[in-house]
Image (cartoon, grey):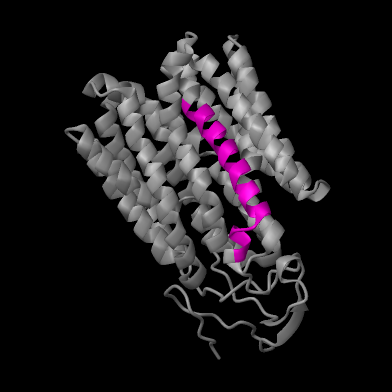
Amino acid sequence: MLTPLAGDDGPVSPVSPVSPVSPVTTETSGPSAGVAVAVPSGVPHRPTWALPALCVTQVVGWGVLYYAFPVMLPALTRDTGWSATTTTAAFSAALVVSALVGLPVGRLVDTSGPRRVMTAGSLIGAAALAIIATAADVAVFTVGWVLAGAAMAATFYQPAFAALTRWYGRDRVRALTVLTLAGGLASTVFAPITATLTEHLGWREATLVLACIVLLTAAPLHAVGLRGPWPPHDPDVAAGPVDAVPDARAITRSRPFLQLAVALALSGFAMYAVVFGLIPLLTERGASTAQAAWALGLGGLGQTLGRMLYRSLAARTTVRARTAVLILAGAVTTALLASLAGPLWLVTLVTVGAGTVRGNLTLLQATAVTDRWGTSAYGRLTAILAAPVTIAGALAPWVGAALAGPLGGYAALFWLVAAVSAVAAGIAVTA
């Protein structure tokens, strides 16, 4: 007998071929301590191809909608005559839109699953890139990026994290690690590809090629790979108040949540400023655009390494300790990039180290809500926590481009960014 479940379209498999779902009573801790809640003991079957599909689409999504822009920016400004500050502001607007649209996206994924949202996001992303590629002026270029921001909200990590957290239950950290390991390769794969396409075709044609990649890979993988039942909540995670429905509004107004949001936002600002400032920093010091793109791409390998280490780190540290240590490590690697003028191989090695820190921070943010408040309102709480981080990341490229000149170059900017990370680490210690 098939048990109907609310969620995405597709055949709904039995919860158990042997025994029916029976309620169990759990007692929560934390904000909902002492609340006994009856929950089902079985876990609905998760889509077999969900994790592989999400891995591929994260590489494509981040690689095309995020990492391609800083690589093609020099060619874009030379070809159009638009300033780097203006074009970067358009990209920053996309990230702000992503943060705002992420709030309703989180609620939609919580209630109905990721399939429709992420498929629509892929189609919107392809259309946005086509608009960007054919834009005749900055206004149309900006409209394209604003549309791309909506696609980012619907296809980047947050909806994917919510999907895997719900589907994988106790095994969520492993699934999230696998996903972010794949996602960490986005810059490694697409920074060199974008540089090659831009060099041989021009930035407009390169953008159209990237739009086709999104249309032909991400959209069908989301539509097919995420087809399956969506459980009402995760009944199979023991740690924390996961089976209760928490008071999300009270949590988001609490001091620990607000301090965590501030710390992660400052850290996110610093992290994205480094990502977007790396190519101009290296070219300012004599590296070619291709060499700088490879350094950025190898930083993606560092992210993969960092994500492989996170599970072990999480098992050996407290939530507060690893939050503060990882943010402080970001400050240290940024300061090293600011101080090292060469050789290029050594700077690239530090870039890999910075990527390792970024990889850990991505998983830290992915598990921040479940480690503290459980999984029942994961999509909503994570979207709220991620919004200031995304907005800070949106401002980082524009602020970096605007401050680099007055500060005397990108090395000075990186020193400032390292100081911001240090402040974030101090806030995390007290959270």
State the image coordinates of residue 368 (x, y, percent, origin top left): 65, 53
Q: Which residues are magenta?
A: 250-276
Left/right placement of residue 305 relative to residue 52 reads right
Which residue is more in the foreground, 196 or 265? 265
Quadrant of res 283: top left
Is residue 274 placed above or below 386 in the rendered structure? above
Q: Position of residue 261 (x, y in %)?
A: 59, 48
Is 221 on the left-hand or right-hand side of 420? left
Which of these two is toward me, 266 or 115? Answer: 266
Q: Is residue 274 magenta?
A: yes
What secondary structure is the magenta-colored segment mainly? helix
Q: Is residue 129 visible?
A: no
Q: Residue furthest left?
A: 136
Q: Is residue 263 visible?
A: yes
* Residue sitting at x 48%, y 24%: 277
Q: What is the number of callouts on the image?
A: 0
In which quarter of the view is residue 22 placed?
Answer: bottom right
Q: Residue, x 68% and y 25% (percent of image)?
A: 332
Q: Residue at x 65, y 18 (%)?
A: 336
Give coordinates of residue 193: x percent, y percent: 41, 31
Of 224 and 349, the residue lying toward us: 349
**Residue 223 in the image, given as x and y percentages of width and height:** 40, 63
Q: Name the image quarter holding the N terminus.
A: bottom right
Q: Is residue 205 magenta?
A: no
Farthest residue in the right direction? 316
Whether 20 is drawn above or below 342: the answer is below
